[in-house]
Amino acid sequence: MGLLSLAIWTPIVFGVVLLAIGRDDQARSVRWIALIGAVVSFLVTLPLYDGFKLGTSAMQFVEKAAWIERFNVYYHLGVDGISLWFILLTAFINVVVVISAWEVITERVNQYMGAFLILSGLMIGVFAAIDGMLFYVFFEATLIPMYLIIGVWGGPNKIYAAFKFFLYTLIGSLLLLVAFIFLYVKSGGSFDIVTWYKLPLGSTAQTLLFFAFFAAFAVKVPMWPVHTWLPDVHVEAPTGGSAVLAAIMLKLGAYGFLRFSMPIAPDAAREWAWLMIALSLIAVIYVGLVAMVQHDMKKLVAYSSVAHMGFVTLGFFIFSDIGISGGIVQMIAHGFVSGAMFLCIGVLYDRVHSREIASYGGVVNTMPKFTAFAMLFAMANCGLPATAGFVGEWMVILGAIKVNFWLGLAAATALIFGAAYTLWMFKRVYLGPVANDEVKALTDINSREFLMLALLAIAVLYMGIYPKPFTDVMDTSVADLLKHVAASKLN
């Protein structure tokens, strides 16, 4: 079995084992098996980075086996500089999420842990698949465990939120399937994604494909105005569900633009770039303003995610190497930072059982260690230099300014809005005198919570101080993508 198959199937096998043998009276053993499974699943991804060859845009660690031979569907896997880091990020976040649920989840523990492990494997499958139908199967299959995570372990309106999440993402995906079938026919019966890149497609075909891809991926990002499902889902999802949703699942949509929209329909991508840039700027500015008036911490961070992902799509569609690289770096950084912020909210919610900002005040007085972590993640969310949140945003703004000064200036306003809503929330929750008896009774983080937050803090600081390993991996693949997009495919 190849490395990519190990990365995909190791967490899935552990998840299935937990579903099969675990019971609530064995919760302690279930948690340890889940942790071992998550750690092993992360460790098997590390050789991918160690063995990755720089200086080539070709797919690496390729595996290919017949699956549905009648329709030329293959179990075809491979990674390049665009997808590699997302596989490692997914496996890493899964470890943190398992640790976060150690004491919080007390019912159906095996099902909760199993769902996250299976979800992790399926998301890695999305990033590794280079067969169109295999990609689609993994892409859609991720909905099932997340739907159950929200619907079973969520808040009071969990059924509504789970249904809204499933419905929004499913409708767009149906158009994705239609696009794939069209490409299959056009290519003479092939689902190979690299083969699709070489197809000579007319202007109309490219435009229809671009908007079919847009329907599937824009909802997933989510871009304005199809972002409305995200705050509702975040509010109702359990802490681990929110962390994975923000850190990884939103990235599936942005990754789809890079893997499908831009290389398969490059002329349409250039023609409609103005629309993508406009929608991205609305997300950056308008949604940032919406975040400022939120009273629920989870909603605030959810809207923050929409704004930050607006930076990602903006970086992609200015068609510059630093812009696309910045967008990818921002995706990785957002995975660390947003996941950490949702886990911090979860730490407070576990103690006070409220996400309302007004329920807190002066938390630093009773939880100084926790507040130090929360401050680091808040600064990263603001885009403070030397944190992961700064690197991608700075690259995107620099790329935008090279294209158009006013475009770069508009994008830079996100740093102001991001600082405004993040610091305003931090001030009201953590600073000042103790606000009430519940805050006065709070206890600081335990060793498990410290480990969970420390892992993310190390990642945030390492990426902020030394981003070179991240950018080196993606440089050649980004340059190749830009070269491909610049070459017209109109026949």
Image (tube, rainbow, N blue to C red):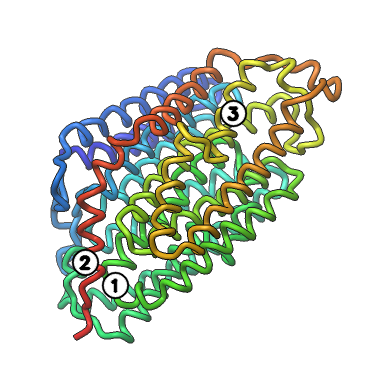
Say which of 17 and 301 sits in front. 301
Marks 3 and 1, how far apart at CA: 46 Å
Relative to 485, residue 55 above or below = above
**Which mark identifies residue 179?**
none
Q: Position of residue 110 (x, y in %)?
A: 49, 31
Precedes in sequence: disc 2 or disc 3: 3
Give, as a three-letter code, the residue at label 1.
Pro
The local secondary structure at tag 1 comes to helix
Tell me the mark number nearer the camera, choosing from 3 and 1.
1
Q: Seen from this angle, which residue lies furthest front?
A: 405
Count residues near mark 2 (Cα–Cα under 10 Å), then give few for <14, some for 14-19, many for 20+. Answer: some
Marks 1 and 2, how far apart at CA: 8 Å
Residue at the image point whose x is 38% and y is 37% from the top? 16
**Which mark identifies residue 484?**
2
Q: Are marks 1 and 2 in contact (CB under 8 Å)?
A: yes
Q: Which residue is mark 1?
A: 266
Marks 2 and 3, how far apart at CA: 48 Å
- Residue 423 vs residue 467: left or right? right
**Which mark identifies residue 105?**
3
Q: Position of residue 45 (x, y in %)?
A: 27, 34
- Residue 257 vs residue 421: left or right? left
The quarter in which the N terminus is drawn is top left
Relative to 5, residue 386 above or below = above
Q: Are marks 2 and 3 in contact (CB under 8 Å)?
A: no
- Residue 235 vs residue 204: left or right? right
- Residue 1 vs residue 256: left or right? left
